[in-house]
Structures are given as structure tokens and as C-alpha cells.
Amino acid sequence: MAHCPPDLVTFAHALGDIACDLLRRFARETVTVETKGDGSPVTNVDRAVETALRDAIRRVHPGHGVIGEEFGRDRADAEFVWIVDPLDGTREFIQGLPLFGTLIALAHRGEIVLGLAEQPLTRDRWVGAEGHGTLWNGTPVSVRPCAALADAVISTTGYDSFAAHRYDALRPLRADARGISNGDTWMVFGLLAAGRIDAVASDGFYLHDYAALDAIVRNAGGTVTDWAGERLTLASDRSILAAGDARLHAEILARLAA
């Protein structure tokens, strides 16, 4: 996989600044909430942030494409394509819980080469990019060794919501793990990259949900696939398995396939 150009890492930080400045400004204001066709909520904030990001990309890199949660695909066949989830955790944002954030990824010729994720209120930012490693608030981080599920702290984020249809597969993992990270948020992937937890298994992720998180974990030394063991692409199914240790990933993958 090609290294991510340094100037595009810098530009990703600029996009993160745009998104998070807006999210901080809107966080204490009353927002307009609608329900999308899939039953999930969307606010005027989701749309305002994505519009600002698209405008910045169009202005600075007019030849790049954009795939966004709220406004779909624009030049999605371009060499470089930005993948934007302007407000991941809209329900938490509406409720005032600091578990939401912005997710921004970059694909080069169809391969995910960069991911940025930030919680705007705590200002925790993870950036992982090919050839650059993964940084948490500017400090390099890496996954920790953990060879077996019996010794692992895992997350099954979405277990009681978007991954509920996977109870039969996820319940035994939760029962046999040493511990469970109960935070129902994208931030568990950042904690995995930083060596705070050992694995994340879930389903129900769209491209804009997983692209940035894939890059963050992989560039911290972790392994990320779907439940069939395939590397994530722009066309992957909605399942995800991320682990800090390849041995742990293999054990969980075998159990999911059983």
C-alpha cells in the first residue's frame, strides 16, 4: 500500500479542525432533529459539518472525490477520495453525551490510507496514516500484545443497538473475555490503537463508519478485517473485527466462523 502524502495528512488535520470547531460550537445549542429512512436521527449539525468539509475539499483539492454520510458520492472514482462521517454518534450528540465525534478517511486508488477521528469536547484526536503510524493527540501509540481471548478486554460496540442481530455470535465472546469495554462509541477503536483494550467485534458499520477507524488501528500495528477475514475496502460488508494482536484476531475470527 502506498504511503500517504504528508501534505494530505496536514490537510486531514485542517479538515478535523473545521469539523470539530463546528461541533464544539453547536454542542450546547438546540438542534433540529429529523429521522432518516433507516430510522436513524440526523440533525442540522450533521449537514452543516459535512457541507463545510466538502467545501474545503472542493476549494483546496478540486480533483479529489468525496463520499459522505449525508450527501452521498461526488467523483467517487477519483484517484483520491475523502470519506466523511461528519457526526458519528448523532444520538449521543443530541443527548449531550461526549461520545460523538467526527470521522474522516482518505482512500488512494480504492485503498484506505488515512483515518482521523476526534471527540471535539475532550479534544482527543487519533490520526493513522500509511507510512506515518498512528498518533493520539500528537503522540505515537501502538497496540498491546494479547494472544488469547481469555486474557483480553474486548468491545462489542453496538451490541444492544445496531449489532443486536449478532447476539448469538457476540454473546460467547463477551462471556469468555477477561473484560468488556462498555463504551458504545467509535472511541473504542482509538483505545485499541493506544493499547488500552485488545479487540473490537461488531456488525452494522457503513463505509463512513469504519474507514477512518480501520486506518487508525492498522497503523498502530493492529489487524482489521471483516468477519470473513478479508481486509476492509470501500466495498466491504458491514462486519468488522479489529484486534491488537494477530493471534487474538485469529482466535476470534475462528470463533465467529464456527
Image: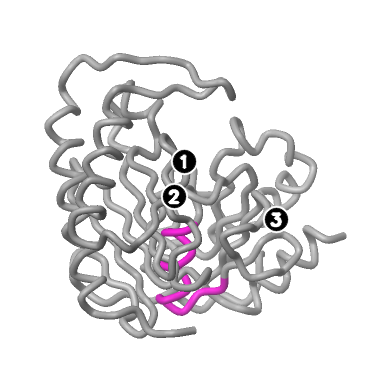
Q: N-terminal of the two: label 2 or label 3? A: 2
Q: Is residue 133 above or below residue 177?
A: below
Q: Describe the element under mark 1 as helix, strand or loop.
A: strand
| The stretch drawn in magenta includes residue 214 | yes
* Magenta segment: 211-223
**Residue 95: which quarter of the image?**
top left
Up-down: is 22 above or below 45?
Answer: below
Nearer the camera: disc 2 or disc 3: 2
First reached walking from the N terminus: tag 1 or tag 2: 2
Say how the picture is coloured: one colour
Q: Amino acid at mark 3?
A: Asp
The disc placed on residue 67 is 2
Which quarter of the figure is the C terminus placed in?
A: bottom right
Identify which residue is drawn at 39% across, 64% down. Answer: 106
- Residue 20, given in percent of the width and then of the height, sits at 19, 44
Q: CA distance from mark 1 to mark 2?
A: 6 Å
Residue depicted at x 47% and y 40%: 184
Q: Position of residue 188 (x, y in %)?
A: 43, 53
81 vs 147: above or below: above
Query: Which label's residue is closer to the chain start, 1 or 3?
Result: 1
Give the residue at mark 3: 176
- Within 10 Å of disc 3 (Cα), the crowding (few <14, some 14-19, many 20+) is few
Determine which residue is flagged by label 1.
72
Q: Which x, y percent locates residue 124?
A: 23, 54
